[in-house]
Image (spheres, grey):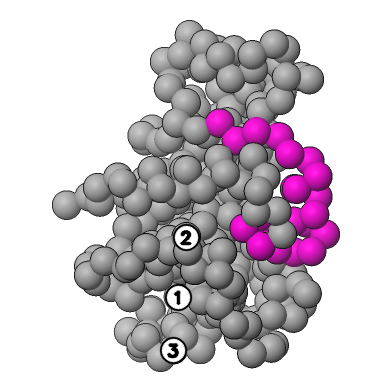
Amino acid sequence: MTLSELLRSPAPKADSDLQAEAPEPEAASAGRVVTVWGSSGSGKTTLAVNLSFELATLGQRVLLIDADSHRPSIAAALGFTEQGPGITAVLRLLRANRLTEEELERLTEEIQFGSHRLKVLTGLNSPSRWPELTPELLRALVNFSVDHFDVVMFDVSSELEQGLFSAASEVPRNACVTALVEQADIAVGVFGSDPVGVNRFLWDCREASFEFWPVANRVRSSVIGKNPARQLRDTLHRLARLEIKALVPEDSAAADLSLAKAEPLCLCAKGSKMREAIRRLALDILDEPTKD
């Protein structure tokens, strides 16, 4: 059963394995904001989706938002057949000062799995609508969302270059990425663990004027050589003085199954090494204090 089918069916009975993983939720407080950024082709959307599900299994109220102004893809990753109005509808309500918890509930998709659930706000339904993702409205969305969720997860574009404008808009082309990274309690920077992915990431880091957690994705010895984890750590430290926060191993069978079923790893490949690494990263996120 795909997630789009799950959305149309009643919630299944609690899965005992998932139930055992979830601790008692803590007292309500202002939520934390996580922005997942990364080089093109690094797998940042896959990571954002799976982190969101892992955080939900840990008892967190999670809102996953597709704020990629270039290539929104969360709806496709989750198998949604109809994307809906998504983020632009929410931003229009914010502009009119009419966004309520009930409206946000109506405009998001809810995914229930076992005894857990998370909410998804899909991205742009037309590439030409990127000027609607203004920094001011996105900051307002952050401020609204953290009052209703424990974790607000943003998937953003890989593009950071500043000073790009369109003749049809006064909004800088990549201003939304900068705005959401600056609002984040934690910014995650994802890169592919191969020579091209590392080189691309080092170029992107020149535009990254913010702190972030470097995460190496699809780590494998077949393209890096013996002891790829050590080689990646040494390379990032030597060339950019960056310390890798997490290494997610390559697991092509689990990743392909996840894509084919449009399901996160915690549902279709619970025991995969890839899933375990992402789960540990989710635990690190919960351990990190939020900004004052």
Quick check: can you spot residue 257?
Answer: yes
Sooner in the amino-acid sequence: mark 2 or mark 3: 2
Neighbor class of circle 1 (other Cα within 10 Å; few <14, some 14-19, many 20+) is many
Q: Nearer the viewer, residue 104 or 289?
A: 289
Q: Return the mark for residue 269.
A: none
The vertical placement of 148 against 58, above or below, is below
The answer to whether residue 192 is left or right of residue 188 is: right
Q: Which of the 4 image quarters holds residue 264?
A: bottom right
**Residue assigned mark 2:** 21
* Picture mark count: 3
Amino acid type of the residue that numbered disc 1 sits on in the rendered structure? Leu
Q: Which of the 4 image quarters holds residue 191?
A: top right
Amino acid type of the residue that numbered disc 2 sits on in the rendered structure? Glu
Q: Return the mark for residue 103.
A: 3
**Residue assigned mark 1:** 91
The vertical placement of 220 against 233, above or below, is below
Amino acid type of the residue that numbered disc 3 sits on in the rendered structure? Glu
Q: Does the magenta stretch include residue 262?
A: yes
Q: How far apart are marks 2 and 3 (CA)?
A: 31 Å
Do the numbered discs 2 and 3 sit on residues whose CB atoms are within 8 Å? Answer: no
Q: In which quarter of the image is the N terminus?
A: bottom right
Residue at image coords 45%, 49%: 282
Q: Nearer the viewer, residue 276 or 209?
A: 276
Give the overall secondary structure of the magenta segment. helix
The magenta segment is: 247-267
